[in-house]
Image (cartoon, rainbow, N blue to C red):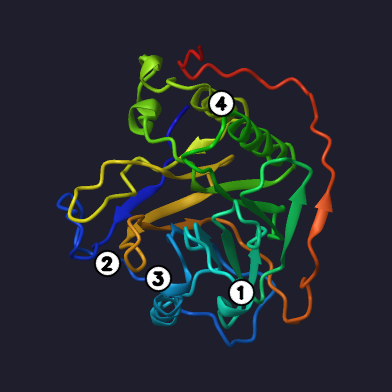
Amino acid sequence: MSDVSCNVSTIKYKSYVNYNNYNDEIQTLNECTTNRNYPTIQQNMLIIYSNVDCLPNKIQELNSSIKSSEKVPDIIVLTEVKNKRGRKNYNYTDELKIDGYRLFSNNLLRKENRGIIVYGKQDLKCKQVSLNNSFMEYVLLEIETDHKVMHIAAIYRSPKSSLENSLNMCSLIGDICTIPGYKLFLGDFNFPKIDWKNHMESKNIDMQKVNESESQREFIATLIKYQLKQHIKRPTRARGNATPHIILDLVMSNESFIENIEFDAPLGKSDHSIIRVSCKVNPKISTEKESWTKPLDHVDLEVKKSSQKKIDYGWNIL
């Protein structure tokens, strides 16, 4: 599996985390497009992702960060938005709204879910899609672009996941990959023992180091089968003053449309970095606020059993 040819740069983290190997330069975003007369096509797309470890106590900081950006993100993907102990009588969809965005989520009232929220700019032509799959912790958006449809999947896999849950997640990824168009997967997959940097760079890997469980083997096999590139090579999580050393948050795509990836300080006291993904994809936008504000589309997807072209990445799945 070859690495994507994107310019990965880094920016300064907050002082409570020791990021000695990172640059101090902060790369600003492009000019904000809010409150303008929109054209039919917007140039490029900015997507922000992070595991926020409880959003309600960080929503004001998130709002401030968006308002201070020179270009607001088109899509904001957040996982673990609920408190671990849960909050009764809390209306997430009302309390966590952001001006200028539509809020999409998985079932936030389901006790077992840690919760995923995806914010899409009000003017983007996008809708939420649900596939006929048993995996619960995901949000899938379908976005119109000037060339073809793009699907953005936000995924959270609990570190306590059963093998069945992991297999369902792999099945979901496969189902999404059978739909034509651009594919982008972002989320916290909780596979800390996969050495992604060496995976991508070497063809002679000791697979025993990363195949300690059936879940990992199936996940890796799924990425290979559907030719998905995993773009994150640097640690994304650290606690306290520790130097980050674990890659849990992943960004995967089916084509080379990712132009740049940047890492920012965590939101609040979360220990997961904010990941900014700039895509060479031009989304269509609407001048009517009411358009594309549709209920969830339920799609019964019949997975095609077409033969996949076998590609030798130098990996031997045991």
What's the residue at 31%, 43% (across, down)? 234
Q: CA distance from mark 3 to mark 2?
A: 10 Å
Which is more foreground, mark 1 or mark 4?
1
Question: Closest to the observer: 61 or 269?
Answer: 269
Q: Earlier in the sequence, mark 2 or mark 4?
A: 2
Question: Closest to the observer: 259 or 231?
Answer: 231
Return the residue at label 3.
29
For disc 4, the neighbor class at 10 Å (few under 14, some 14 to 19, many from 20) is some
Return the residue at label 2.
26
Q: Secondary structure at mark 2?
A: loop
Residue 23 left/right relative to 301: left
Q: Which mark is residue 44?
A: none
* Disc 3 to disc 2: CB gap under 8 Å: no
* Disc 3 to disc 4: CB gap under 8 Å: no
For disc 1, the neighbor class at 10 Å (few under 14, some 14 to 19, many from 20) is few
Return the residue at label 1.
89
Q: Position of residue 307 (x, y in %)?
A: 74, 20
Q: CA distance from mark 3 to mark 4?
A: 33 Å
* Disc 2 to disc 1: CB gap under 8 Å: no
**In the rendered structure, which amino acid carries the disc numbered 4?**
Ile
**In the rendered structure, which amino acid carries the disc numbered 2?**
Ile
The image shows residue 268, relative to residue 69, as above or below, that is: above
Residue 314 left/right relative to 16: right
Q: CA distance from mark 1 to mark 4?
A: 43 Å
Return the residue at label 4.
224
Q: Secondary structure at mark 4?
A: helix
What's the residue at 65%, 65% (across, down)? 104
Q: Earlier in the sequence, mark 1 or mark 3?
A: 3
Residue 195 left/right relative to 259: left
Which is more foreground, mark 1 or mark 3?
1
Residue 158 left/right relative to 109: left
Q: CA distance from mark 2 to mark 4?
A: 34 Å
